[in-house]
């Protein structure tokens, strides 16, 4: 469990956390505000199983984990959950665009063109978020985070009890 909190990443890592966290937090909130367009309704069109359950579940994961990233608490755990989330989004919506037809039961959205360049255009945010999350998983939350503060506090208390 201690490994979840260890980080020697620079303080500027907060920028990646806020960028990724705010996008997921915003998208998660919108899944509750506009369920027909962004959650159950959209999931039905895409071919996500049990869309009435998965819509709020995914929205909840995005809200909670997005907020955790912003404050830098349980950052690696939140990054894992969101990596799964964004990976499913890529497989279910971007791979069909690349192939030009449905894939694994996921349907193809209507676009002016399909193929590699169209998929790259549609996935630009997804790929950026995926790489940002991978970065946070590798380096941790950074110096300006609750994770780092907990580790500093823990090591100070351990040091004072050892004296």
Image (cartoon, helix red, strand yellow):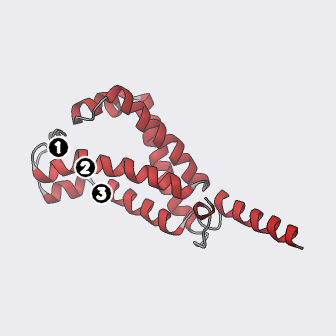
* Labelled disc at residue 17: none
Instruction: Provide residue 145's location: percent of width, then percent of height.
Output: 64, 60
Pointer 2 local density, CA inside 10 Å: few below 14, some 14–19, many at least 20: some
Locate residue 150: give its quadrant: bottom right
Residue at label 2?
91
Let me know if residue 28 appears in the view.
yes
In the rendered structure, the answer to whether residue 15 lies left or right of residue 110 reads right
Q: Position of residue 124 (x, y in %)?
A: 30, 57
Mark 3–mark 1 Cα distance, whole angstroms, equals: 22 Å
Tell me what residue is drawn at x 30 percent, y 27 percent: 41
The quarter of the picture where residue 4 lies is bottom right
Residue beneath disc 3:
124
Q: Is residue 112 above or below residue 14?
A: above
Mark 2 against mark 1, which lies toward the viewer? 1
Report which quarter residue 28 is drawn in: top left
Identified at 44% across, 59% down, the residue is: 133
Question: Which residue position is annotated with label 1?
Answer: 104
Disc 3 on helix, strand or loop?
helix
């Amino acid at each position: 469990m201690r490994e979840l909190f260890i980080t020697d990443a620079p303080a500027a890592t907060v920028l990646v956390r806020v960028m990724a966290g705010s996008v997921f937090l915003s998208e998660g909130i919108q899944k509750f505000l506009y369920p027909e367009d962004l959650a159950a309704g959209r999931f039905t069109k895409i071919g996500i199983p049990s869309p009435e359950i998965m819509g709020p579940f995914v929205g909840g994961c995005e809200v909670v984990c997005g907020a955790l990233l912003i404050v830098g608490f349980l950052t690696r755990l939140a990054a894992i959950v969101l990596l799964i989330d964004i990976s499913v989004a890529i497989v279910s919506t971007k791979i069909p665009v690349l192939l030009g037809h449905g894939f694994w039961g996921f349907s193809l959205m209507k676009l002016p063109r399909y193929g590699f360049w169209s998929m790259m255009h549609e996935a630009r945010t997804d790929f950026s978020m995926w790489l940002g999350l991978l970065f946070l998983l590798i380096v941790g939350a950074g110096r300006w985070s609750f994770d780092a503060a907990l580790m500093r506090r823990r090591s100070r208390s351990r040091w004072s009890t050892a004296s």
